[in-house]
Amino acid sequence: MDTDLDGMSREQLIAEVRKLRHGIRVHRDSTGHELCWHHPALWSLLPEKTDPLPLVPEWPQFLLGCLRYRESLDTQLPDAPRNDKPYRA
């Protein structure tokens, strides 16, 4: 894993770090239904230290969003393996 990094130049590595940081920031700065999970451990990998409070949907809107997301997986990935294990926090 990560052996693709071995052949990268310094410039390519810097570009990769910037791309990853951008992706983490986009996730960190999302809110409402765009934010699926609160990941302060992931966000702490960035040099700036901030843990913004997301705008959290009310329960009915949140659950509707979860249902729509799960329905979209049936459409996009109908043959994906299924799991019936209960969620554990």
Image: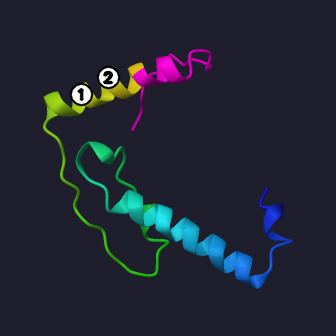
> What residue is at 26 percent from the left and 66 percent from the top?
52
> What residue is at 36 percent from the left and 79 percent from the top?
49
The region drawn magenta spans 72-89
Q: Quadrant of the C terminus?
A: top left
User: Which of the numbered marks, if any, corresponds to residue 67?
Assistant: 2
Can you tell which quarter of the image residue 70 is in? top left
In this view, 69 is above or below 25:
above
Residue 76 colored in magenta in the image: yes
Graded by Cα atoms within 10 Å as few (under 14), some (14 to 19) or many (20 or more), the crowding at tag 1 reads: few
Can you tell which quarter of the image residue 78 is in? top right
Can you tell which quarter of the image residue 8 is in? bottom right
Tell me which amino acid carries mark 1: Leu
> What residue is at 72 percent from the left and 82 percent from the top?
11
Give the main secondary structure of the magenta stretch: loop
Q: Nearer the viewer, residue 74 or 54?
A: 74
Label 1: which secondary element? helix
User: Which of the numbered marks, if any, corresponds to residue 63?
Assistant: 1
User: Which of the numbered marks, if any, corresponds to residue 75?
Assistant: none
- Circles 2 and 1, Cβ within 8 Å, touching? The answer is yes
- Residue 19 location, x and y as percent? 57, 68
Q: Is residue 50 left or right of residue 6?
A: left
> What residue is at 40 percent from the left and 61 percent from the top?
26
Tell me which amino acid carries mark 2: Leu
- Residue 38 location, x and y as percent? 34, 53
Q: Is residue 87 left or right of residue 12?
A: left
- Residue 62 location, x and y as percent? 22, 33
